[in-house]
C-alpha cells in the first residue's frame, strides 16, 4: 500500500505567473480525496504534477510503500474528456492499456467487464457510435482495468446531464470499493465532492494553497441527492460562506 506525499513549494507558469505556492498534503492508501477550488486555482496543474506530466516545480512528490520509496506507482488518469481513440473499438481502447500478460490471461473476461459498467454487447462498437455517457463509462473502465494504486480524476463527469452523471458517480464508488485505489478527484461541485470523498481539500485562488482540509464522515456509498449530503453542504457553506471563492474565513 502506497502513501502519497505532496509538497509543492512553488509552481510558476511560463508567463511567470505563480500558480501554486506552499501547498502540502499526504494521502493514505485507499483514501478518496476531492480537490475543490475556484477557477484558475491550479487544480489540473496539481494533478499533472502528481502524474509526472509536468515536472517544472520547486518541491517534491513522493510515494512510499512501507519502508520503501516508490517513484512509479501504477497510475491511471481520467481526464475531463473521454479521450478514446476513434478508430479503435471499445475493446481495443481497453486492451490498449493492458500488458501482454493481462491481455492473454485476464482476471475478468472482457464481456464481464463491459457488463459490469452497463456496456454489455458494446465491445465491437466505435467511440463515435456511443453516447457521451457511454464513452465516459468506457473511460472509467479503462482507468480501473489495470487496477491502479493511484487514480487521478480531473472533473471526469463535467458536461453530462444530471441523471447520467449521477449514474457514473455510483458506478465510480462501486469500482473504487472493489480494488480501493487512492483517488484524487478534482471538481468544482461541493455536492459532488461530498457525495464521493473521504476528505476534501479546499484550495485558495492563485497562488493556490490548502485553506481547509475537511474529513467527510458519511458512510459509502452516497448519492448526490441524499439528505445527508445536502445537509452537510449547507452546513459547510453556512460556516464558510466564501469557501468556494478561495477564502476560508468563518461566518
Image (tube, helix red, strand yellow):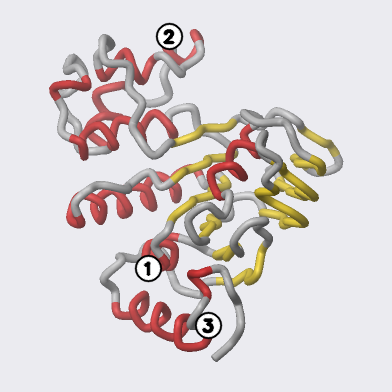
Q: Residue at x 19, y 32 (%)?
A: 119
For disc 3, the marked residue is 240
146 relative to 249 in the view: left or right: left
Q: Position of residue 70 (x, y in %)?
A: 77, 33
Displayed quadrant of residue 41: bottom right
At label 3, counting other C-alpha atoms closer than 10 Å, the crowd grade (few under 14, some 14-19, many 20 or more) is: some
At label 2, counting other C-alpha atoms closer than 10 Å, the crowd grade (few under 14, some 14-19, many 20 or more) is: few
Q: Which mark is residue 174?
A: none
Q: Indicate whether 229 appears above or below 56.
A: below
For disc 1, the marked residue is 191
Who is closer to the viewer here, 190 or 178? 190
Q: Residue at x 59, y 61 (%)?
A: 205
In the structure shown, which secondary structural element does the residue marked by tag 3 occupy?
loop
Who is closer to the viewer here, 114 or 130? 130
For disc 2, the marked residue is 104
Of callouts 3 and 2, the N-terminal one:
2
Q: Indicate whether 72 appears above or below 62.
A: above
Of callouts 2 and 1, the N-terminal one:
2
Give me the C-alpha separation between circle 1 and circle 3.
15 Å
In the structure shown, which secondary structural element does the residue marked by tag 2 occupy?
helix
Q: Residue at x 26, y 47 (%)?
A: 159
- In the rendered image, the residue lying farthest to the right is 67
Q: In what quadrant of the picture does the N terminus appear?
A: top right
Q: Position of residue 162 (x, y in %)?
A: 20, 57
Give me the C-alpha separation between circle 3 and circle 2.
53 Å
Q: Nearer the viewer, mark 1 or mark 3?
A: 3
In the structure shown, which secondary structural element does the residue marked by tag 1 occupy?
helix
Give me the C-alpha separation between circle 2 and circle 1.
41 Å
Q: Position of residue 30 (x, y in %)?
A: 58, 51
Amino acid at each position: 500500500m502506497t502513501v502519497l506525499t505532496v509538497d509543492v513549494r512553488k509552481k510558476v507558469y511560463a508567463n511567470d505567473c505563480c500558480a501554486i505556492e506552499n501547498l502540502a498534503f499526504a494521502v493514505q492508501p485507499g483514501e478518496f480525496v476531492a480537490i475543490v477550488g475556484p477557477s484558475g486555482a491550479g487544480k489540473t496543474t496539481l494533478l499533472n504534477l502528481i502524474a509526472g506530466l509536468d515536472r517544472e516545480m520547486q518541491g517534491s512528490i513522493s510515494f512510499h510503500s512501507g519502508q520503501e520509496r516508490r517513484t512509479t506507482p501504477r497510475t491511471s488518469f481520467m481526464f475531463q474528456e473521454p479521450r478514446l481513440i476513434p478508430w479503435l473499438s471499445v475493446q481495443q481502447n481497453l486492451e490498449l492499456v493492458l500488458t501482454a500478460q493481462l491481455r492473454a490471461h485476464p482476471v475478468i473476461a472482457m464481456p464481464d467487464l463491459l457488463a459490469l459498467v452497463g456496456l454489455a454487447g458494446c465491445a465491437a462498437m466505435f467511440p463515435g457510435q456511443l453516447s457521451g455517457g457511454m464513452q465516459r463509462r468506457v473511460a472509467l473502465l479503462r482507468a480501473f482495468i489495470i487496477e491502479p494504486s493511484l487514480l487521478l480524476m480531473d472533473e471526469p463527469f463535467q458536461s453530462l446531464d444530471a441523471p447520467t452523471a449521477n449514474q457514473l458517480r455510483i458506478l465510480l464508488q462501486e469500482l473504487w470499493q472493489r480494488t480501493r485505489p487512492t483517488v484524487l478527484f478534482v471538481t468544482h461541485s461541493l455536492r459532488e465532492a461530498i457525495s464521493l470523498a473521504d476528505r476534501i481539500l479546499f484550495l485558495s485562488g492563485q497562488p493556490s494553497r490548502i485553506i481547509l482540509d475537511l474529513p467527510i464522515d458519511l458512510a459509502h456509498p452516497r448519492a448526490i441527492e441524499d439528505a445527508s449530503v445536502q445537509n452537510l453542504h449547507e452546513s459547510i457553506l453556512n460556516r464558510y460562506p466564501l469557501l468556494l471563492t478561495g477564502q476560508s474565513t468563518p461566518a
